[in-house]
Amino acid sequence: MENFEFVSPTHFVFGRGAEEQVGAKLAERGARRVLLHYGGRSAVESGLIGRVKASLDAAGVACVELGGVRPNPEVGLVRQGVALCKEHGIDWVLAVGGGSVIDSAKAIAVGAHYAGDVWDFFETKQPTDDVLPIAVVLTIPAAGSEASKNAVVSNDALQMKSGYPNNAQRPKLAFMNPELTFTLPEYQTAAGITDMFCHLLERFFDDVGAVPVTDNLNLSLMKTVRAEAPRVMVEPDNYDARANIMWAGMLCHQGLAGAGRHEDWATHGLEHELSALFPHITHGAGLACMFPAWMEYVHGENPTRFAFYGREVFGLAPTGDVDADALSAIDETRAFFASLGMPTTLAELGVGEGDIEKMIPTLRANKGEPFGSFKKLTMDDAREIYRLAL
Ligand code: NZQ
Ligand code: ZN
C-alpha cells in the first residue's frame, strides 16, 4: 500500500429539497455576497436558479449572477467570473450545475485573489491556498467534481484542455438532490454513468499490487453503478436509482477508491485531448470509446488483474486461460457502455485518423512522456490507442 494524503472537507446535504438549504447553510458560514454560477439553460428552465436565489434572499445573502457555462468549460468565461469577484468583493462561489459549471467555479475561486491570469494555474500547476470557498448544487452525477480536488478547463485559443489539482478548491458544501437529475437527457445520464465508472477503472488498474481495503470499496462501487445504471435508463424518475447513482458518482471520484494506489489516468488524458479539439464531444462519450481501446492495448502487462475485474464485476467464470478471461472482461466493459447508448468508436463522434496527430503535442504538454501507471505509455503508444478506438 503506497503512502497517501487524503483531504475531504465537503459537507454534504443529500436528499429531497436539499437545495432549499443553500441560503441558510451559506449564511451560517458567513457568506455575504456569492457569485451564482450556472450553465446554458437547464437550471434556469427547471426553476432551480429561481429557487436557489429565493433561498439566498431569505437568508440575507446577496448574489451576482454569471450563467452560460458550456460543457467542456472555457477559460474566457472563467476570466469574466474572476473580474466579477474582484469588482463585487465576492466571498463564496456557488456553482449550480454539473462538472463543467463546478470546474469553472473552481477556476474562478482560484483566480479571484490572483493578480495574474488564471490560466497560469492550469499551465504551471502552481499551488495556492488563497482560494474562495465553493458551494455546489449538483444537477448531474458524472464528473464527481462536487467533492474532487480537480478542475478541468479548456483554452480554445491554445486548443488545450488542462487539469488543475488543488485540495483547497474542493467544495466546502455540496447540495445533492436526486430529484434534480430527473430532467437529464438520456445521453447525459449515460455519459455521466460512463464517466463515474471510468473514474473507478483509472484507480483500479495501475502498477500497485492488491490493496484490499481500497480495491473492495472500488469493486463494490463498480458493481453498484453497473446494477443501478439500467434502472435509471429505464426509469428516469426512479428516486432510489437516481439517488444511488448520484452518491456513487461522488464516491467514485473523491479519492477513497484509489487510496494507497498510484492510479493510472492515461485514458482521461487521451480523452481530454479529444474534447479539447472537439468541444462537442461529451467527456463520458469520449471515454466510452477510449477505455476499451486502452484496455486492449495494455492488458498484457497484467492480465490477471483484468481477469479478476471480470470475475468480480461481470461474474465471468474463469476458463483456465487468463488472457482469454482478460479479453472477455474488456468485451463486457465495451458492452456495458454500449448498453447505455454510448458510442463504441471515435468514428461515431466524427473523429478520423487525420485528427490523431493534432492531439499529440498537447497530450505531451499535459501528461508528459511517458505517462500512465499500469503501462508507461509513449506518444507512439498513444497514437496506437487512438487508432484502436477509431
Ligand atoms: O448547460 P445546461 O443547460 O445546464 O446543460 C447541461 C449540459 O449540457 C446538462 N444538464 C446538467 N444538469 C442537467 C442538465 N440537463 C437537464 N437536467 C439537468 N439536471 O448536461 C450537460 C452536461 O453538463 P456537464 O456539466 O458538462 O456534465 P458533467 O458533469 O459530465 O461535466 C463534464 C466536465 O467535467 C470534466 C469533464 O472533462 C468535462 O469538462 N471533468 C471534471 C472532473 C473533476 N473536476 O474532477 C473529473 C472528470 O474526469 C472530468 O474530466
Ligand atoms: Zn472523468
Image: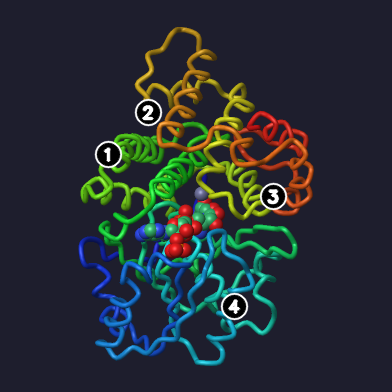
Residue type, label 4: Gly
Mark 1, residues whose alpha carbon is within 10 Å: few (<14), some, or many (≥20)? some
Instruction: Choose top left, top right, bottom left or bottom right for residue 117.
Output: bottom right
Residue 36, visible in the rendered structure: yes
Task: Say whether disc 4 or disc 1 marks the residue closer to the N-terminus.
Answer: 4
Q: Secondary structure at mark 3?
A: helix
Distance between the alpha carbons at the discs numbered 4 and 1: 41 Å
Query: In percent of the image, x 59 and y 80: which residue is there?
Result: 80
Disc 4 versus disc 2: distance between alpha carbons?
A: 41 Å
Question: Do the numbered discs 4 and 1 sit on residues whose CB atoms are within 8 Å?
Answer: no
Within 10 Å of disc 3 (Cα), the crowding (few <14, some 14-19, many 20+) is some
Q: Pointer 3 and pointer 4: residues touching (CB < 8 Å)?
A: no
From the image, tell me which residue sits under label 3.
367
Graded by Cα atoms within 10 Å as few (under 14), some (14 to 19) or many (20 or more), the crowding at tag 2 reads: some
Q: Does label 1 or label 2 sit earlier along the sequence?
A: 1
Q: Does residue 270 appear to the left or right of 359 in the view shown?
A: left
* Mark seen at residue 313: 2
Vertical comparison of 203 with 18: above or below: above
User: At 70% from the left edge and 58% from the top edge, which residue is drawn?
Assistant: 160
Residue matched to label 4 = 111
- Quadrant that contains the C terminus: top right
Instruction: Residue at 29% x, 87% y: name it.
Output: 57
The residue singled out by tag 1 in the image is 231
The three-letter amino acid code for the residue at tag 1 is Arg
Q: Amino acid at mark 3?
A: Lys
Mark 3 or 1 closer to N-term?
A: 1
- Residue 299: give x, y in percent of width and height: 58, 24
364 vs 309: above or below:
below
